[in-house]
Amino acid sequence: MTRPQAVIFDCDGVVVDSEPVSFDLLAREFAAHGLTLSHEELERTVLGLTMANVRLRANALGADLPADWVPRFYEKLYAALARGVALMPGLVAVLDALDAAGIPYAVGSNGSHRKMEVTLGQHPGLMARFRGGIWSGQEMPHPKPAPDLYLHAAAQMGVAPGDCVVVEDSPTGARAAIAAGMRCFGLSAEPNPALVAEGAEPLAHLADLPALLCL
């Protein structure tokens, strides 16, 4: 392929290793409201959704999460994430390669801006690199799996959608990227048929990305 003109990264599970913390808390919250799910089941069920849709999905499966659960959960989640989240392995080297090639990059997440401030903000150098290019699907007319977030990011970066590459780890996000007309890599250390089914190309490690982008 020709080199992309821009790369857009999902945040959780792609830029920061925040999903284990989130799933631990979700599992406890669901169990307290009548629904027991393992981490694997949580990943299959809610990965990539907005928290409002997580509540709807959980209640459809038998939980009794109240109407005010989302803001109360977010406060607990922000506190848990503030205790520390690592960057995903290989991320800094990928950004260095993109910088060397003169290719801009951004973050597009269904998470809230405050959540990204908590996680990315723990890494000031990284936050500075993404400054001005961090967008939340919660501020779009429709979050992922709709393409709105990725189309907005491309427009803000001044790049045609077809010249953008997206790195995702959820089927929800991959569907959004493909719907936006963008090439998508699905980051997963193990084969993930759900990502492939949405049109994502397998990416086992971030360190493999520069070669796949012909950098």
Image (cartoon, grey):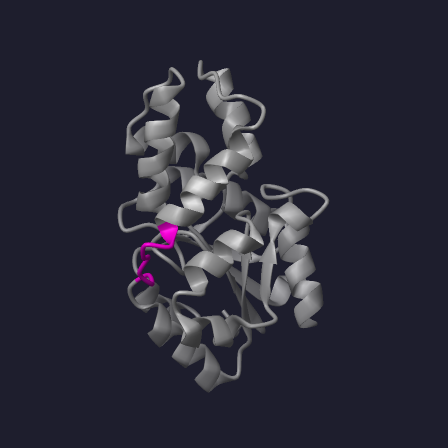
Residue toward you, 87 or 206: 87
Whether residue 132 is in magenta: the answer is: no
40 left or right, relative to 131:
left
Residue toward you, 89 or 103: 89
158 left or right, relative to 196:
right
The answer to whether residue 43 of the structure is visible from this angle is yes
Q: Is residue 74 above or below residue 148?
A: above
Image x and y of residue 96, in percent: 40, 80
Whether residue 87 is in magenta: the answer is: yes
The answer to whether residue 48 of the structure is visible from this angle is no
Q: Residue at x 42, y 29 (%)?
A: 45
Q: Is residue 44 above or below residue 1?
A: above
Residue toward you, 5 or 37: 37
Image x and y of residue 39, in percent: 30, 33
Quarter of the view holding residue 161: bottom right
Q: Residue at x 45, y 33 (%)?
A: 46
Report the magenta stretch's main SS: loop
Q: Residue at x 55, y 76 (%)?
A: 104
Image x and y of residue 106, in percent: 55, 67
Q: Residue at x 44, y 13 (%)?
A: 62
Give the quadrant of the C terminus. bottom left
Q: Is residue 206 above or below residue 191?
A: below
Q: Report the span colored magenta.
A: 81-88
Image x and y of residue 87, in percent: 33, 63
Number of marks present in the image shown:
0
Residue toward you, 36 or 181: 36
Q: Is residue 37 above or below residue 164?
A: above
